Amino acid sequence: MLQNLLSLRSHLKRTADLIKTGWHSLVPCPCLLCGAESRDMICAACHRQFFSASTARCFCCAIPLDNHERLCGSCITEPPAFQHTWVACNYEVPLDQLVLSLKFGHQLAVAPSLAGTLADSVLSAPEPDQPLPDFLIPVPLSRERLAQRGFNQALEIARPLARQLFLPLYPRLLSRVRDTTAQSLLHPDQRRKNILHAFVPDDGYEDKIRDRHVGVVDDVMTTGSTLHEIAACLKRHGARRVSNLVFARTPPH
């Protein structure tokens, strides 16, 4: 069984690489990080420098660890509702600019590159027995925030990520029913209360949740409060397992 999983991951990674690099190989463009001409939006040198290093992380919340323990102390003492988190990198200079250019600079062309590095992380993860989700969903925005921004950055990442991982994507499975205060504006102790009961499944999707492994896609994970609340909502409606697929993880201060 393990050998089959390893072979499948290897095949998926080769195919994802072809999807990811297909049109970039025809049209050279400046690297998003260093500006050098590249056949990919993140050049090979920057990819080696920023995305190839292996970082010890908590299996559950993906926070960087100084040791090789499987779980951090917080996930042991107060386990979140999700079981696993994949991330591509830490949210730090200069990689934070990739997120900011997408989220606030409206550079939607950045999203496939974020998805590509995240897909690489998922398919190259050191836990070969960790199953891929049955399908993906993006962290939803409220109607007010979506109207203000004009797009959902998590969905922009989830679309190419689903294609590269050959997974179904259900962008309307969850709705955000409360326009909460932006989590980034709150103290960490206030974030879980702020987001409590903010999500509900849309009509017609509850059967898709029951007894399934759901993958939740987002751009940045800071305290994990939003992802915990989404996972708790999915578990209340019968999800068997919830995993997060997040481009960047904020390291501890």
Image (cartoon, helix red, strand yellow):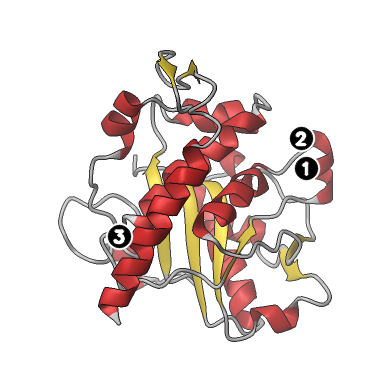
Residue highlighted by disc 2: 149
Name the N-terminal-most of marks 1 and 3. 3
Residue highlighted by disc 3: 58
Compare residues 203 and 252 and report the one nearer the observer: 203
| Residue 72, disc | none
Q: Position of residue 198 (x, y in %)?
A: 72, 62
- When asked about the image quadrant of residue 105, the answer is top right
Residue highlighted by disc 1: 145
- Distance, label 3 to label 2, CA atoms, is 32 Å
Compare residues 64 and 85 and report the one nearer the observer: 85
Residue 70 versus residue 160 in the image, above or below: below
Q: Position of residue 227 (x, y in %)?
A: 55, 60
What residue is shown at x 80% (from left), y 61% (from top)? 177
Q: How many other residues sit within 10 Å of disc 3, few (<14), some (14-19) or many (≥20)?
A: many
In the picture, measured across the screen, residue 53 lies left or right of residue 207, that is left
Mark 3: which amino acid? Answer: Cys
Q: Is disc 1 in contact with disc 3, using a CB cutoff of under 8 Å?
A: no
Mark 2: which amino acid? Answer: Arg
Q: Is disc 3 in contact with disc 2, using a CB cutoff of under 8 Å?
A: no
Q: Is disc 2 in contact with disc 1, using a CB cutoff of under 8 Å?
A: yes
Q: Position of residue 76 (x, y in %)?
A: 31, 71
Residue 251 in sight: yes
Residue 222 versus residue 229 in the image, above or below: above
- Secondary structure beneath label 1: helix
- Distance, label 2 to label 1, CA atoms, is 6 Å
Q: How many other residues sit within 10 Å of disc 2, few (<14), some (14-19) or many (≥20)?
A: some
What residue is shown at x 48% (from left), y 70% (from top)? 82
In the picture, measured across the screen, residue 131 lies left or right of residue 164, that is left
- Quadrant holding the N terminus: bottom left
